Image (cartoon, rainbow, N blue to C red):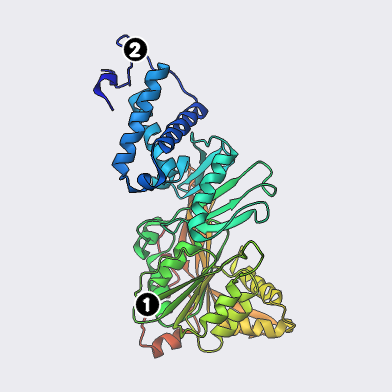
Amino acid sequence: MNNDINGKDGKHSLEPNATAAQAFTPNEIVELISRVHSQIMDQVEADELQRLTSDQKLSRAKDVLTSIMKEEGLFLPLKLCRQIENEAVAEISGFGPIQPLLDDPTITEIMVNGPNKIYVERDGKLSLTDKVFKDDAHVLRIIERIIMPLGRRIDEGSPMVDARLPDGSRVNAIIRPLAVDGPMLTVRKFARVPYEADNLIAFGTFSPEMIQFLKACVEAKITILVTGGTGSGKTTTLNVLSSFIPNNERIVTIEDAAELQMQQDHVVRLESRPPNLEGRGEVTIRQLVRNSLRMRPDRIIVGEVRGGEALDMLQAMNTGHEGSISTLHTNSPRDALSRLETMVLMAGTELPSRAIREQIASATDLIVHQDRLRDGTRKVTSIAEVQGMEGDIIVMQEIFIFERQGVSADGKIIGEHKATGLRPQFMRKLAEDGIELPTDVFRLETHGRR
C-alpha cells in the first residue's frame, strides 16, 4: 500500500490531521470485504484472475481498499486493513470468512449457524467468533464453492450434502427449507500432519500399553470396531490404527466423503455418490462394500457403518477378509452390537435374531470405545473383546478401561487407564502369527495415564 497513507501510529491515515480510526462492526467489515472483492472481480477477467499469484491478488486488494478509503475518507487501523485485504483474497480463491479459521491449527471444528453466528471448537470447547458472512447468499456461495469440484449439488430438491475440503476435512451443509434459519455449514477439520500413536498417548486418549496391544491386534488381522459418539475422535483413532497395517498389504477404503489419511503405498480409495438431478446414478456404501470384495483386498476399511452395508461387511469378515476396521456411532460397546443387529435388519434380510448375532459374534473380535468427556478431552474408555455366544447373548469382556476418579478444581476429569487383568481369547492367534506381547501389558495395576 502507498506509503503516504501509513500513519506513524500504525493506522492507514488519508489526511495529515487524521488521529483516530473509526470503529467498525463485524457486519460493516464484511461489507467492506465484499466491496473490495466485487471491484477486483469487475476489474479483472476470470481467466486473468486464475493466473495471478497470491501476492498479486493481495496487491490488487490493497490497491482497491486504498481507493475506497480515499474516496470515502475512511481511517482504518493497519491490522484491520490487512484483515480486509486477506479476506477479500479468500473470497476470490479461498472460502471467505471461514478461511482464517481453516488456517488456524488450534481449531478442530467450525460451525456456521447462519451468516451472523460462526462458532469454533478449540480443545473440545465451543466459542463464538467475530467472523460473519454478508447474508444467506454469501454462505450459500461458499458452500457451492466447496462442493462444486466434487460433483455434488445443493438446492431445494437436494438440501443436504456431505463433502470434503482439499485437505480432507469433512464438510456437512444443509439449507432451506430443512434449515429453518438459513444455510448451515459444519466443517470437521483434520490435522494437516496425521496424528500418530505417540500423539494420542500424549493427549491421554490411550495408555502406551493399550497402543501396544492394538498394534499387535492390527498386525494379527483382528477385526476391530471403533465406536463412540459424535466428535469423540473415532476417525482419528481409525487413522492411527490403520497406520499399523503392514505396507505390503492392499487396502480398500470406503467412505461417504473420502477423509481417511492412509499412510501405506497400496491404497484404493472408494467414495459413495448421491443421485444426480434426475435421481439416477446413486452409488451407496453397500454397493461399494460388495464391489470391494472383487478387488482382491487384504483389508477393507469402512469409514462409518450406518445402514444395510453392515450385513455385507459382516459376511466379508466371515469369508476370509479378517482384519477389517470400521467406525460406528454408539454410546457403549454393548450398544454397538445392538446397532449392528438393527442395521443388518435394515438391509431387508429376514434372518432370525440369533443368526444375525452369531454372524456379529463370529465377525467382530474387538470393540474400541471412545468418548468426549465433559472437559472436552477425548479418551478411549473401553477396549472389549467379543468372545462369542452364550445362548442368545453375545458375550463380551473388557480388556482395558478408563476409570474416572473425580474432577479437578479447574474442571478437568481425573482418571486412569487400567487393564482389567483379563487376557483376550485370541492371544493364541497372535502367537501363531509370531506376535508376542509382554505379560505386563495386561497387569491389573493402573497404567498411569491421566
Q: Amino acid at mark 2?
A: Thr
Residue at the top extreme, as displayed: 17
Query: Residue 54, position in %: x, y?
Result: 32, 44
Image position of 244 (left or right of 259): left
Residue depicted at 48% across the width and 63% down the height: 235
Residue receiving disc 1: 266
Q: Residues within 10 Å of mark 1 (few under 14, many from 20)?
A: few
Mark 2 / mark 1, whichever is N-terminal = 2
Give x and y (percent) for residue 450. 43, 56
**Viewer-proximal residue among 12 and 381:** 12
Q: CA distance from mark 2 to mark 1?
A: 63 Å
Which one is nearer the viewer's eye here, 281 or 161? 281
The residue tagged with tag 1: helix, strand or loop?
Answer: loop
Quadrant assignment, res 162:
bottom right
Residue drawn at x 39%, y 46% as measured from the top left:
103
Q: Which residue carries the number 2 mark? A: 19
Disc number for residue 383? none
Q: Is residue 2 visible?
A: yes
> Amino acid type of disc 1?
His
